[in-house]
Image: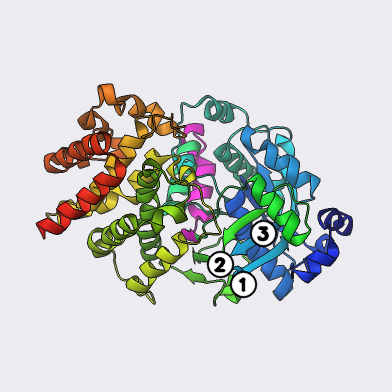
Amino acid sequence: MTDRALSRLLLDETKCARTGVHLPSYERHQLKHGIVHLSVGNFHRSHLAYYMDILASEYHQTEWGIIGIGVRSVDKPMSTVMKSQHGLYTLVTKGNAEQDFHARIIGSILEYIFAPDEPERALAMLVHPNTKIVSMTITVRGYDLDMNDPDIQYDLMNFDRPKTIFGFLVHALNIRCQNNEKPFTILSCDNVQHNGHVTKNCILKFVKALNNLELLEYIETKVAFPNTMVDRITPVTTDDDREYVRLNYGIDDGWPVISEDFIQWVVEDTFCNDRPPLEYLSSSPYNILLTDHVDAYECMKMRLLNASHTAMASLGYLIGYTYIHEIISDQHVQYYIEQLMDREITPTLQPVPGVDFDKYKQTLIGRFANPHIKDNASRICMDGASKFPKFIVPTIQEQFKRGNQPHYCALAIAAWIRYLGGYDEQKKPIQLQDSLAVEHRLDRLAARDVLDIKQILDVSQVFSDIGKNQQFTDAIERLVELFYEIGAKETLKKWINDASNSE
């Protein structure tokens, strides 16, 4: 089965060999699953699945294959492709120079289950004794657990056919508890600070609604939720990417993954069941760190990388750029991001063992500037209402405590509010993909004809209490008006000049 599946992908085996495509060096039928991953997307396939492929290929680890499960209806297209390719796909990593491009067929995903069609089978795979770890990439928004959601309410009443991520996790753990079996570790791989703690709180909230005291004790005392910090810029796959893989490597892949060549994973070593020998991948270029103290790494990455990404995306989009590398190549944007990181973010960070912040920030600028990744700004703009409270608001609050007005953070928020207004500077509609912003009517409040900055900043789920700072609110009101009056590019220049003149 594996050889036939691989052969279907390799349209031109001669070209594949000539271009150095790495093929699985292990027999996939001998690879056992040890991990079930919920919500398989591009990031999982460039990160955890890649790491498990390395362990199988280079270190002969055969216990850590992956079963992918798609839980949402939007996972159906991925399901169709992954099933047709028997879990195989191409990962192309691209450095800043073309000689740093590498293609690899990943074989670590052994099977894909589309849970809406086969909920019992998905649940059985979670309960299977081989499943030592259940990992997940459900996006930042996925952790905003609403117990009144109809699907959550359904899962509270239906144990054998869940519909949601947390429904599947809780009911699988309940079966293991009832059978007096060892639980699996739940491993969040999302950009959420303290993602393990956040996941645990969501699980406990669900269990408390069930009023199942035995299960509550089982989870609180036996299930591990390691905190992790994950890092690899991985954009959405396009038809151009499919054609690129076909023409350059001779591979007919329905859903290849293109990512940068940098990768990092910091993992809290608190697994409650067995785990892969991640320490084998501690050195460059794999950069896995097992530690009991993930916090400092999480904070550094989210406040520097994710905050900068978020800050530049809506600003660059409004200026008229399409891709992140185009945005950071604008000298004024790069200066702005450097000032944001140096003056407002870095002073709020705790020291991180083995990390030179100046070098780290220089590396980030280089990663953002990679012209081969073509990471669309609109992808980074997605779910801004879930990103700002995690990536940017904490820096603002810390600066307030120090008696400072975060000048550059204000620009990030103002640019996003202008983006929420619904039209770009050429009067073209902006396709907002942000359910939390819509839920709180931020898109309506940001419309030019009813613009109400105070009411927007009073949405505590997004902005916490920063709207109570009148000077900061005034600055954002001024900035948003400037965005409408003189445009994003001129507003950026003016704000930079104002900062320089006030020093």
Q: Position of residue 12 (x, y in %)?
A: 84, 60
Query: Residue tagged by mark 2?
Result: 95
Identify the disc placed on residue 99.
1
Closer to the chain start, of discs 1 and 3, is: 3
Is residue 142 rendered to the left or right of residue 179? left
CA gap between label 1 and label 2 equals 8 Å
In this view, the mark in front (1 or 3): 1
Cα distance between the residues tagged 3 and 2: 13 Å
Q: Is residue 181 visible?
A: no
- Report x, y in % for residue 226: 49, 58
Which residue is at the front of the view, 32 or 128? 32
Q: Secondary structure at mark 3?
A: strand
Q: Three-letter amino acid code at disc 3?
A: Leu
SS for dot 1: helix
- Please say whether residue 220 is one of the residues in the magenta stretch: yes
Inter-mark Cα distance, 1 to 3: 16 Å
Magenta-highlighted residues: 207-230
Return the residue nearer the eye: 128 or 135.
135
Please, what is the three-letter code of the amino acid marked with disc 2?
Answer: Gly
Relative to residue 135, is residue 175 depicted above or below? above
Observer able to see residue 379: yes
In the image, taking residue 276 as reference, residue 349 lies left or right, namely left
Using the image, determine if residue 105 lies above or below residue 452. Answer: below
Colour theme: rainbow
Identity of the residue drawn at 50% across and 70% down: 290
Q: Are marks 1 and 2 in contact (CB under 8 Å)?
A: yes
Instruction: Residue at 29%, 39% (x, y): give it.
Output: 487
Is 29 rendered above or below residue 316?
A: below
* Neighbour tally class for label 1: few under 14, some 14-19, many 20 plus, Cα within 10 Å: few
Q: Which residue is mark 3?
A: 91
